[in-house]
Image (cartoon, grey):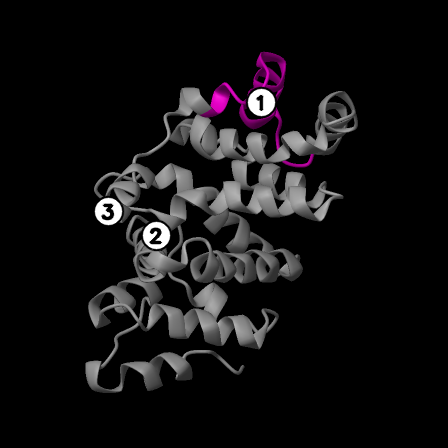
Amino acid sequence: MLGRAAEICRIGMPGWCTAMAVSPEMETQLLFMMNNVRWGNQKRYQLWFARKHLMVPGGEERIPDIVRFICCGYHPTNKVMQSGVIARWAVIGWLLTSCNKSYVQANAKVALFYDWLFFDEGKGNLMNIEPAMLLMVNSVSQYTDITNMLLEFLFLLVENYDVRRKEAIAECVRNAFAVLVKKGVVPSLDILTCCEKLSPMLRQKLVAFLSSASPEETEKTCGQPIDEASKAMDLNNRVCSN
């Protein structure tokens, strides 16, 4: 039964399913922002969207559905991503900071990381996990609290989402990190493991978490050679002190 449940969880959610969770008007306006609104001009469009859809009774509770739609229901083309319009990860960051209710924010973070928990490189879609990674690495210098919050929550999910399958989930999350580096979404994880602004405890936890992978996978993820006999020590030394 557990094996069957795991296989079901690994089935990717079709984008049209997530689109059904938001209204056609919300979908149209979100797509307009992510296809036409350039960086620096997004605030007035975000305020416009928030007033119409979020600052109404029950509106905030829709944020997890919106996050899920952005992750799985809209995958921009390379042309759009290079055009200077507001990125998916930035829209999600704005939505997370718009949550006034803690349970809504928690549900939104689950929506953001859900595909990480069951990620399979052969079946999973890289674009579903990309926004969370880019939100963490692009926030770490100026909005470090967001990166701290997301990493802490990711580790919380790994430990508690399904205790009986904790090791399998941890392996899926490690695979997600490795594939994001391998596919060039980020050049390496040094921006997290070597960032002084990031919580030292979270940095060390991330390094220890990645060190549970094979030496080859950890080398691919972190972008630095690793000697198998002293793997754990080398990883800890890479939590940069300068």
Residue that sits furthest to the front in the current view: 1
Say which of marks 1 and 2 sits in front: 2
Q: Which residue is mark 3?
A: 3
Q: Which one is earlier in the sequence, the residue at label 1 or at label 2?
A: 1
Q: Is residue 99 left or right of residue 4?
A: right
Q: Residues within 10 Å of mark 2 (few under 14, many from 20)?
A: many
Task: Kindly identify the residue that appears in the image at 55 percent across and 62 percent down.
Answer: 152
Q: Which residue is mark 1?
A: 36
Mark linked to residue 176: 2
In the image, residue 32 lies in the stretch drawn in magenta? yes
Q: Which one is earlier in the sequence, the residue at label 3 or at label 2?
A: 3
Residue that sits furthest to the top in the current view: 24
Which secondary structure lies at badge 2?
A: helix
Task: Check disc 3 and give the amino acid type.
Answer: Gly
- Front residue of this view, candidates 118 and 42: 118
Query: Is any part of residue 85 visible from this angle?
Result: no
- Front residue of this view, candidates 69 and 137: 69
- Residue 68 percent location from the top left of the image: 51, 33
- Residue 107 percent location from the top left of the image: 58, 43
Q: Residues within 10 Å of mark 1 (few under 14, many from 20)?
A: some
Image quarter of the N terminus: top left
Residue range highlighted in magenta:
18-40
**Mark 3 in CB contact with mark 2 (< 8 angstroms):** no
